[in-house]
Image (cartoon, rainbow, N blue to C red):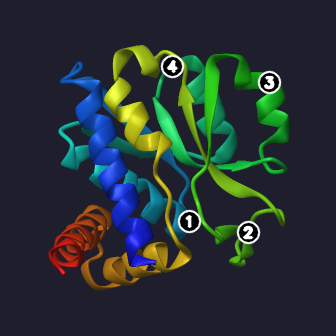
Amino acid sequence: MRRLKTGLLSLAALLLSACGDGASHEVTLLTGAAPSELARTHLAAAMLKQQGVQVSIEEARLGQIWQRLWAGRADASVTVWLPQASAPFVERFFDRLDDLGANDVGLSEVVELVPLHDKPHTIVRRTLVEESPQAVAILKNIQWQPSDIEEIMQRWQLSQDWSLAAETWLAEQASSSVDVRKE
């Protein structure tokens, strides 16, 4: 499990270095209000910030997420639920968006207020690829385990700060991956 996390973090860093410096475009992530959605979004933001990308996070309901991404008033969401929950929005708004795929490993088995078999996907507006390829590369390769999200939610319970919870968890993962490589 740790090796998977370490490998994914390393892959994101390698992809970022391959993209070059890129523009210092600020990326706006949209999220729902559920704790699991906030944890995923703040973890994605922490990974982007770690690589020098400026990030802002805004909460919105599912339909608003799709509409704001389509209209270019936000850049991405790592919490959009597909295929069933978002089917009507896909039909209406998908022409300007790209689905980077499911970003979980087993989260669909966790009981949440979403249809069975749906998973959170990373959705980005198409023009973000040109504006901030490094951000898209990081977002495309994000994968997490249910235990990752649960740990961040527990940290939030202590700090009441989603960014702090995600950033400290990510820092611990990075330091433990350094320890694994030394062995």
Q: Nearer the viewer, residue 24 or 33?
A: 24
Q: Earlier in the sequence, mark 3 or mark 4?
A: 4
Amino acid residing under circle 3:
Arg
Residue marked by disc 3: 92
Amino acid residing under circle 1:
Ala
Q: CA distance from mark 3 to mark 4?
A: 15 Å
Q: CA distance from mark 3 to mark 1?
A: 24 Å
Residue marked by disc 4: 72
Q: Residue 160 lies in what quarter of the image? A: bottom left
> Considering the numbered disc 2 on the image, is that residue within a helix, a strand or a loop?
loop
Mark 3, Cα crowd under 10 Å, few <14 / some 14-19 / many 20+, is: few
62 sits to left or right of 142: right
- Residue visible at 84% across and 36% down in the picture: 88
Which labelled disc corresponds to residue 34?
Answer: 1
- Residue visible at 32% across and 30% down in the picture: 134
Amino acid residing under circle 4:
Gly
